[in-house]
Amino acid sequence: MTLKLHQWTKYSANGDNCVEVMRTADEVLVRNSNRPEEAPQRFTFSEWEFFTQGAKLGVFDLA
C-alpha cells in the first residue's frame, strides 16, 4: 500500500485497535485512531523505510 500525501490511512486487524499513518512532505506520522487528539509519533522517510523493511522480514514479530 502506498501512503497518500496528507491523508490518514487506517489499519485495523481486529476492529478496536487501530493505527493511522500519514505521509507529509518530509516525514511520516503515526497515531492511535482511538486517541487522535494526542500528538502523533514522527519518523523521517529513512526511519520509516528501515522500520517497514524490518516488519516485512518479521524482525518485530512476537515469539
Image (cartoon, rainbow, N blue to C red):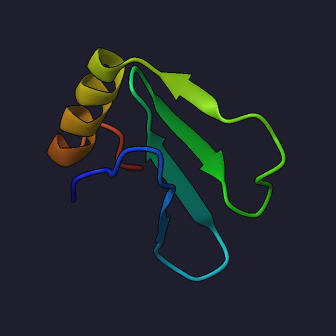
Residue 50: x %, y % from top left: 25, 24
33 or 25: nearer the viewer = 25
Q: Residue furthest bottom?
A: 15
Which picture quadrant has residue 59?
top left
Please give left or right for residue 40 compared with residue 8 in the image. right
39 or 57: nearer the viewer = 39
Please give left or right for residue 27 compared with residue 40 in the image. left
Residue 38 position (above or below residue 13): above
3 or 33: nearer the viewer = 3
- Which residue is painted at 67% across and 36% down in the image? 40
Which picture quadrant has residue 42?
top right
Residue 42 position (above or below residue 22): above
- Which residue is painted at 68% across and 61% down in the image? 33
Which picture quadrant has residue 34?
bottom right
Residue 18 position (above or below residue 46): below
Please give left or right for residue 3 compared with residue 37 in the image. left
29 or 17: nearer the viewer = 29
Quadrant of the snapshot with the N terminus: bottom left
- Which residue is painted at 55% across and 41% down in the image? 30
Q: How many marks?
A: 0
- Which residue is painted at 76% across and 34% down in the image? 39
Residue 23: x %, y % from top left: 41, 39
Residue 3: x %, y % from top left: 31, 50
